[in-house]
Each structure stands twice: as structure tokens, then as C-alpha cells.
Amino acid sequence: MTRAVRLYAPEPQKAKLATVLMDAEGLEVLFAEQCLELLAGSRLGRIAVTIGAVPAIFPVDYRLIDGQIIFRTRDATNLHTASANTVVAFEVDDVDPSWAEGWSVLVVGVAREIRDDVAIALALDQAPSLWDAGVGAHVISILPAFVSGRRFVHAA
């Protein structure tokens, strides 16, 4: 269940009416555009995959490039094997040290290995500081099919 709360956001010379959606737990529901902005501003995420019918979660250094989540992984690893043309979940969040406020974004999409040399070079050119996965590394892309996010703030 989601409820809308109307707030007046300050704007030069006039007040603007803004709508903030709240979920049943009292968390602000983020719009897809807000989620993508938060993803673009972060670097460390977690990918959830299935390995032999068992869920596994791996931290990855990623970049959001042209609407896709891009990261590298080593050859013959569980992550590489499990993220080959499969549906995955990807999460990024940020919480202040006192846990008083923060946000969380969840993406669901299909992970695919980028195999075209030109596309790989372009991705690595746009994200030169991705964790180096060494010789035989693979570049993986997740195209978001579903994006969801929540923001929580400390109640005053």
C-alpha cells in the first residue's frame, strides 16, 4: 500500500507543490529517475545470482553507462558462470553512520557478458577505474527491467 504526501518544496520566488509517495512502512518511494541518479552516483553494489538453486550475493565495483550496469569479473568464477544470460538482482544503498537516514535501490534485469571487442573497449574507456579482474576478465552488463527504491529519514 502506498500513500501520497504533498509537500511544498521551496523554489526561488514561488513555492512548488511536490508529491512524495510513502509506502506502508513509512519509507519514501523513489521514482525510477531518482533511482538511476543514485545508481549513477555510486560505485559499489551487490549482485544476487543463483548458483545451483542457492542464492549468492557478490560485491562488485560497477558503473552505470548508457542506462546499463557494467562490471568486470574473473574467468571461471561462480559470479561469471551465474551471471551469463540470467535474471539477477542488483542492489545499491547508502546509509549515514548513525543509521538515521539513507536510501536503497533494487534493480532486476538480465545479466549478459559483453563479447564485442568494440563494446568492451568503449565500456572500459567510460569506466577505466573498474576493479581489475586480471587476465581473462569478462565485462558483464545488466539492463534494468525493474527499478525500485526507497529513502528513509530519521523521524525528528
Image (spheres, rainbow, N blue to C red):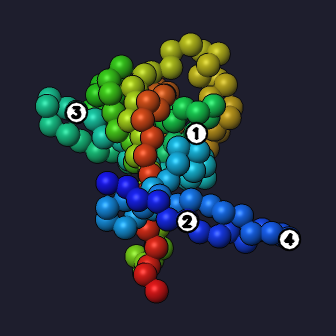
Q: In percent of the image, x 85 and y 70: which residue is there?
A: 13
Mark found first going from the N terminus, 1 or 3: 3
Mark seen at residue 6: 2
Tell me the tag on residue 64.
Answer: 1
- Which of the two residues, 38 or 19, is positioned nearer the viewer here? 19
Relative to 140, 88 lies left or right: left
Separation (CA) of disc 1 from disc 3: 23 Å
Q: Residue at x 45, y 21 (%)?
A: 113
Q: Identify the residue position indicated by label 4 in the image.
A: 13
Q: Residue at x 20, y 40 (%)?
A: 55
At label 1, which amino acid type do we have? Answer: Leu
Q: CA distance from mark 2 to mark 1?
A: 31 Å
**Given the image, on which type of amino acid does mark 2 rest?**
Arg
Q: Is residue 131 above or below residue 53?
A: below
Give residue 50's mark: 3
Q: Looking at the image, can residue 73 be seen?
A: no
**Which is more N-terminal, label 1 or label 2?**
2
Residue 65 lies, with reference to residue 117, above or below; the image says below
- Say if 59 sits above or below 116 in the image: below
Cα gap from disc 4 to disc 2, whole angstroms: 19 Å
- Asked if residue 149 shows in the view, the reply is yes
> Residue 52 versus residue 75: which sits nearer the camera?
52
Q: Position of residue 25 (x, y in %)?
A: 31, 65
Give the camera-side residue of 15 and 72: 15
Point out the frontmost of discs 2 and 1: 2
Q: Secondary structure at mark 2?
A: strand
Nearest to the eye among marks 1 and 4: give it. 4
Where residue 84 appears, as percent x and y from the top left, is: 35, 22
- Mark 2 or mark 3, whichever is nearer to me: 2
Q: Amino acid at mark 4?
A: Gln
Where is residue 120, by image quadrant?
Answer: top right
Q: Secondary structure at mark 3?
A: strand
